[in-house]
Image (tube, rainbow, N blue to C red):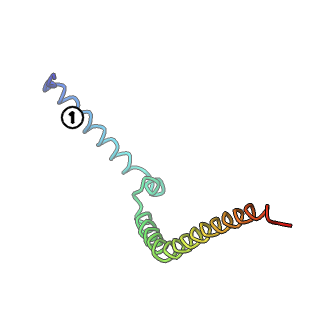
Amino acid sequence: MKLPTPSRLWKFLRNTVAAVCGLAIVVALLPTKARSQLGLDPCCAIMSAGLNSISGLLRSVVAKPLGSIQQNEQHRGASWQLARRLFTAAVRSNRGTAV
């Protein structure tokens, strides 16, 4: 593996620092409405925190009862299918005995 030469390292570091400084200058010169689109507005943090709390409430208050309803429905569906199969089997077995 070749090690990079000091001049290459210096060139890379210089270009990186220049790009970061250029980006910082562009962001500093942007109007405040454009900065909010880059995520520099504190309103985004407030909205994010609010949405996280709503998400947590939905998980704890709504998801648990819905999960239990889903389990009940699955159990009912399984027992209904079993009853239908038993009924169908009983009808088939009694077809020969019908008068």
Q: Quadrant of the N terminus?
A: top left
Where residue 58 appears, x then y in whole percent?
A: 49, 72
**In the foreground, 7 or 67:** 67
Which of the pair 6/14 is nearer the observer? 6
Image x and y of residue 7, in percent: 16, 25
Q: Residue furthest right?
A: 99
At horizontal 45% and vertical 71% (from top left) the residue drawn is 50
Residue displayed at 26% across by 33% down: 15
Can you say whether 27 is above or below 11 in the image? below
Q: Residues within 10 Å of mark 1 (few under 14, many from 20)?
A: few
Question: How many callouts does the rendering have?
Answer: 1
Q: Judge left or right: residue 60 versus residue 99.
A: left
**Is 52 situated left or right of 79 in this image?**
left
Amino acid type, mark 1? Leu
Residue 90: image location, x then y, percent? 71, 66
In the rendered view, tell whether residue 5 sits above or below residue 56.
above
Residue picked out by circle 1? 13
- Residue plotted at (33% across, 41% down): 22
